[in-house]
Image (tube, helix red, strand yellow):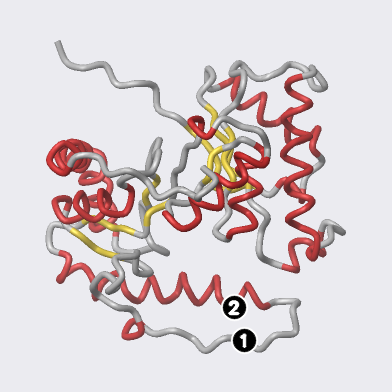
Amino acid sequence: MPAVRPPTRIGTAVVLPNLHKPAQLAEDAAVVDLISGGRLEIGFGAGYRVPEYDLFDADFSSRFKQVERNIAEVRRLWEEGGVTPGPIQSPVPLWGGFYGPRGARIAGRLGIGLLHISHEMYGHYREGLFEGGHDPELARVSDLLPVILADDPEAAWPRVAPHLAHQMNTYRQASVEGTGRPRPPLLSPGDFPETPKADGSWSTLEILTPEDAAVRIHERTNGLPVKHLIFWASIAGMPDDLVVRNIELVSERLPALLAESRAAAGPRPAKVPAGG
């Protein structure tokens, strides 16, 4: 008899609670959890664009204090019945989509998952867990991996690189709007490295075979309490045939290879702060 797969989870990565009323966000999320049969996971973030905050009359300079307060308020509304109907899940799995030390500690203090795979940030996350009085054994991490799978990465790279340049230029230009800072120079396809960085960290984007991806992912996640991985389906409108093949390889080939990679390498302990 074939194995029964668990129900597919759905979620956000990320929604910005600072641009919503907590009650509105709590109620909307509860409805989604009800409609989906209890399959919702929510990734929260602080955002990075000044114009978005200006549109909602929100204070960009205090966004990290606000996001911590608003996430806590959403959870309180669910726990105390402040909105009805409530979600099916209790609790709804929450994630903090933060890439820096301050955000990692916020996720820890709140006792939610960290939506960033990084051994360095994991240390700050655990510090936050201790600070918030949470059991460090409840730590969990996830992330959107900068990986596209292809049968022939060398052939795929020049077809994807222009789309990656467009994506990165869009983010880079948007990040300085409303700040008074000069616009960064536009990137071109030739500005991206085609091989992993020397320190083993992720490049901006890596196009890999499923076999190589399994090894890289194991190297980057070993010792961390990874619950699931998130992948790009497409990079800024890249060619359809590459999109379809990427989805096929991620969903049909990669899971078994990751399991084999973990079994072959064996676990290594995570690096934790001295206080942990």
- Percent x, y for residue 273? 50, 50
Give the CA separation, mark 1 to mark 2.
Answer: 6 Å
Say if 264 sits above or below 99 in the image. above
Using the rendered view, name the quadrant where residue 58 is placed. Answer: bottom right
- Percent x, y for residue 163? 38, 71
Q: Residue flagged by tag 2: what amino acid is it?
A: Gln
Q: Nearer the viewer, residue 75 or 83?
A: 75
Determine which residue is flagged by label 1.
183
* SS at mark 1 in the image: loop
Q: Nearer the viewer, residue 157 or 58?
A: 58
Mark 1: few, some, or many residues within 10 Å (few <14, many ≥20)? Answer: few
- Percent x, y for residue 247? 28, 46
Tell me the residue at 67%/38% (across/down).
Answer: 110
- Percent x, y for residue 214? 20, 49
Label whose residue precedes the other's in the sequence (1 or 2): 2
Using the rendered view, name the quadrant where residue 50 is placed. Answer: bottom right
Q: Is residue 56 left or right of residue 225?
A: right
Determine which residue is flagged by label 2.
173
Q: How many marks?
A: 2
Q: Residue flagged by tag 1: what amino acid is it?
A: Arg
Tell me the residue at 50%/77% (across/down).
Answer: 169
Using the rendered view, name the quadrant where residue 240 is placed. Answer: bottom left
Task: Determine contact: label 1, label 2, CB under 8 Å.
Answer: yes
